[in-house]
Amino acid sequence: MSDKVIRVGGSHIGNSTSISNLSSYLSHNSGRNFVVVSPVPGLLDILEEHLLTVLDKRTENGNISEQLLAVFKARIKTEVTSGYVELANQAANLLRGIALIGDYSTALKDQVLSYAERLSVEILKAVWPEALVLQPESIGLLTTSDFGNATFIALNEEEIEGLAAGTYLISGTYGIAENGKVARTGRSAADYTAAFLTKVLGVEKLELWDLDHDFLRADPAIIDNLPLIKRLTYEEASELAYFDHYSFHPRTVEPLENEHIPIVVLNSDSASGEVETIINTETFVEEQIVKSVACTDDISLLKLDGPGVGLKPGILARVTNQLNEAGLNIKSVITSQTSINFILSKDNGDKAQALIHDLVFSSVTDISVVKDISMIGVVGHGMQHAYGVSAKIFTAVANNQINVVLSGSGASDLVSYLVINKSDKEKSVREIYKAFFE
């Protein structure tokens, strides 16, 4: 009996053509189909919004429930199911309990947010009645206890082995920690859930039922009529996942890489399983080397400057420890002998600066945050071994009078970074794209 694991994005729930095509595609498989579900757009936002405000004012049960019910009604035209109503009320009661207590843990936060996926499965079930529901707790999908960013560690395979052929809907993104509490593995990490199941069940490939944002050569909001990237390595796909205009979870490759299990992105407009992009271990170097010119505005730059920065040991370690203890993620670090530059998310720059000011560095003369910047990632294997790639990149920006705030390459064979002023982002993407693809 052959098994399939396929991830379906929440944006497809309510799209009758896409779900009909998916059902038709899976009907040709004689074995078991495990469909891992991402949250419907809006559900996660509603729950996150109420978590942000729940301690500021007493939460009204009816208001939350009505908002959650409205998502069901907006997606499909059938009557709201009793199962969905029950789940919506459970989420509302949890939030009301938090409001009464006046506090909540990271574990309780994960439990509340897990209803985004549970409710999404219930919506999909309403239009796919022959499918059965398998929740992570019912199949023993275990995680570590680092709530919000947990790692999958085990599955109760005995619970799976006895299942007959058919289609099973599974809530993505969360599992159960060793203490029995719900633990989420990231924000909208259903790709990662599906990848873990693919590995543990010994399935030959992970299938993604389309992406909300396809693997294109650049940001489609900047350049029109972009071609799809047909082949990517695990590393290239993971690198691109950190940019705004891609919707692939970076941790998806973790369970698959050592087993050489490929990932295929399928076209949801086709019922035949038409493949759009293949992601695997094969290093396919294209003639122009570069596969994508990616970009993001979600960065700020924390700079530690001083003539003795390169001589004084321990500065980098103390800063990273301080930021780690505060839960602030460092995207990248670029250094010179007189400056250490931490690339952070846009919202974390000021927080990091305030934390670092509490440390005393005799060799650091200035600590500053650079804002209103963007990062360009020029991605493709072979950069370190191909003559002229860096020259092309810098010539493209120099010829168009684009100032580079910071640059970095060499840490990896597949990416070069440019940090530029936000006002220069679109022009930078166009000119670098033109240099390699036109």
Image (cartoon, rainbow, N blue to C red):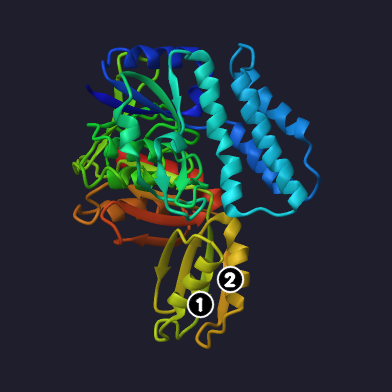
- Quadrant hosting residue 87: top right
**Residue contact at pointers 1 and 2, CB within 8 angstroms:** yes
Mark 1: which secondary structure?
Answer: strand
Tell me what residue is drawn at x 44 percent, y 32 percent: 213
Identity of the residue drawn at 43% across and 81% down: 314
Q: Position of residue 399 (x, y in %)?
A: 40, 51
Measuring 29% from the left and 30% from the top, which residue is drawn there? 161
C-alpha separation, residue under disc 1 versus residue under disc 2: 8 Å
Amino acid under label 2?
Answer: Ser
Mark 1 and mark 2 lie on one chain; the one further toward the N terminus is 1
Mark linked to residue 368 = 2
Instruction: Return the mark for residue 433.
Output: none
Pick the residue in front: 427 or 351.
351
Task: Evaluate whether residue 267 shows in this view.
Answer: yes
Q: Is residue 379 left or right of residue 204?
A: right
**SS label for mark 2:** strand
Which mark identifies residue 305?
1
Pick the residue in front: 270 or 204.
204
Q: Is residue 256 above or below residue 41?
A: below
